[in-house]
Amino acid sequence: MSDIIRLLPDSVANQIAAGEVIQRPASAVKELLENAVDAGAGHIELIVKDAGKTLLQVIDNGCGMSATDARMSFERHATSKIKEAADLFRIHTLGFRGEALASIAAIAQVEVKTRRMEDELGTHLVIEGSVVKSQQPCACTAGTSFLIKNLFFNVPARRNFLKSDAAEMRHILEEFQRVALVNPQIAFSCHSNGKVLFQLPAANLKQRIINLMGSGFQEKLIPVNQDSNVVKISGYAGKPESAKKTKGEQYFFANNRFIRHPYLNHAVEDAFSDLLPEGYFPSYFIYLDVDPSKIDINIHPTKTEVNFLDHQVIYSMLRSAVRQAIGKFSFSSTLDFEAEKSFDTYFPKDRPVVAPGIHINPEYNPFVKKQQAELKLTAPLQQQDNTDWEKLYDFARNDHPSDQSGAKSLTIDADFDSEPLSRGFMQFQNKYIVSRVKSGLMIIDQQAAHERVLYERMLEKIEQQKASSQQQLFPQTVNLSAPDAELIRELLEEFSLFGFQIEHFGQNSYIIRGIPADLVDENIQTLIENVLENFKNNQLGLKVDKKINLTRAMARNMAVKPGKVLMPEEMQSLVDDLFSCQVPNVSPSGKTIIVTIQADEIEKRFGN
């Protein structure tokens, strides 16, 4: 029997590596941008066409490469960053595995033009599917230009699994933002299909955050700083009032590298625990400087997951640093009983204490003209004889002869057996609607019920194209993150079906000129952010039509929230609307709406 184990060809091995390193166009963008940063570039330009499926280009003015280095950079495990295994534990650069360019070249058509500052001519290299097509000298500027065309051209199955252009572009912008945030000293620019998305000059960290996230962050940031021999913490956290229901603006960087670390994320959120309502998340841009020997970044091909040797100490210090920053800027409530004097009461020594005067007119009649009533005003109570209080009581008692006790008019009866039950409904914990039915008790989740009603109502309006819009007297400007701005650009047509009139207003801002006619008492900025967040969460599940997905998100955010007190008439109307729906038992998000407790079960509870 012949041997069956053999070495894979380089082209196949590179495609396998590409499956780990290059999952989508954004992965290639990340690798190329990090290489440009490692090359010492002062300006980096990203050019994208068709969300990277057709073209990706990164141009930098870094150190460039010689002809030999340009060719070697596309070999597997070829790198200038490490020489021995021990170097893995003192890494200061970004790319070091030596797999990125080889992986990209295995699944795309690549052109590289590069020149070192000291060389007169550069190198032009063309590679297609790991095969070098040509390499020759060329005239080019100092630095490197990577051009990637037709990504996954020879792996059609991978290409078919890519999302829409808007979705892939959001991922590209996320990677661009992560690299730009950690390198504010470098100027960046980003172009998509001929349009300039970002033009970021070299600046300090705060200005870079504002340039990327929008001018609204100018007044939202508070500095976070903590230095020790274990970790140096720096960066910014958002003020509590700027918290959102999304986690999109939460960034951790360790040794100038973007990381994901749920354990440290919990430390920051715990620092805000007493200041934010449930369901809201703070924004933060936190930078950790740790001894490279005490951090392991070689546990995942994308290098976004890391391990810290002193993770518990870093957790405590991070939580303390954020709390200190919040307290320093007077956003947490503190009470010093030794210094607090507002509870003391002081009386003047030169005059006696006089009770405040109260004007009372026992002969007041609301049907008498104002001028006549003013003539009958009595003197202040403090100037009357102390025995007159009985006359006032007699007047109040005689004025209501039919109610000698006065108890009924002063008592608010909120008992279960009073008004609510007379209408058949009662609200429990301001969250559920309870009603008696023939078989027992019916309990309805008011938010899920309203969500179902709104969902079917909006779908009907969309199908019949009857959605009405209410013009805004003062149009509102909504500032979004770059990925969300790209998403709303994709959904402008769908938003208009609900009655929104939205116009692009430069970079990541939009003007809301009209809103749905039935949308009342809503913060438009918060509503748009929450709708987009729910839309993205729904996309993680089954693929559904954009209209259906957006309708679910709109219904979820416009529905009445737990804690809302409903009048009996409102409960009656909501239940009537619910039972007129096609699917009254389940909300659009799959949540149970109605639960019935049988009379037999209640009897068993009492042992009957």
Image (cartoon, rainbow, N blue to C red):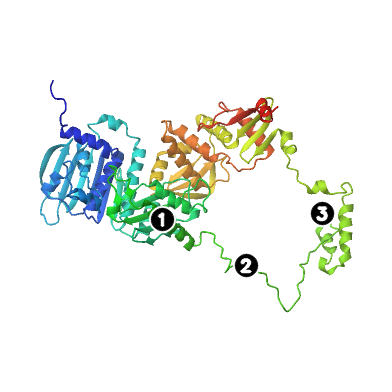
Q: Residue at x 87, y 47 (%)?
A: 403
Left or right of residue 604: residue 77:
left
**Residue 434 placed where, x, y %?**
66, 34
Q: How many marks?
A: 3
Tell me whether circle 3 and circle 2 mark residues in contact (CB < 8 Å). no
| Cα distance in 3D space between marks 2 and 1 | 34 Å
Question: Closer to the camera, 510 or 474?
Answer: 510
Residue 318, label in figure: 1
Question: Closer to the camera, 452 or 350?
Answer: 350
Question: Label 2: which residue?
Answer: 342
Residue 297, label in figure: none
| Cα distance in 3D space between marks 3 and 1 | 64 Å
Tell me whether circle 3 and circle 1 mark residues in contact (CB < 8 Å). no
Query: Please, which residue is most extreme toward the front here?
Result: 607
Tell me which label, 3 or 1, sits earlier in the chain. 1
**SS at mark 2 in the image:** loop
Tell me whether circle 2 and circle 1 mark residues in contact (CB < 8 Å). no
Residue 441 seen in this snapshot: yes
**Residue 107 placed where, x, y %?**
22, 35
| Cα distance in 3D space between marks 3 and 2 | 41 Å
Question: Label 3: which residue?
Answer: 366
Query: Please, which residue is most extreme toward the bottom here?
Result: 350
What's the residue type where badge 3 is placed? Pro
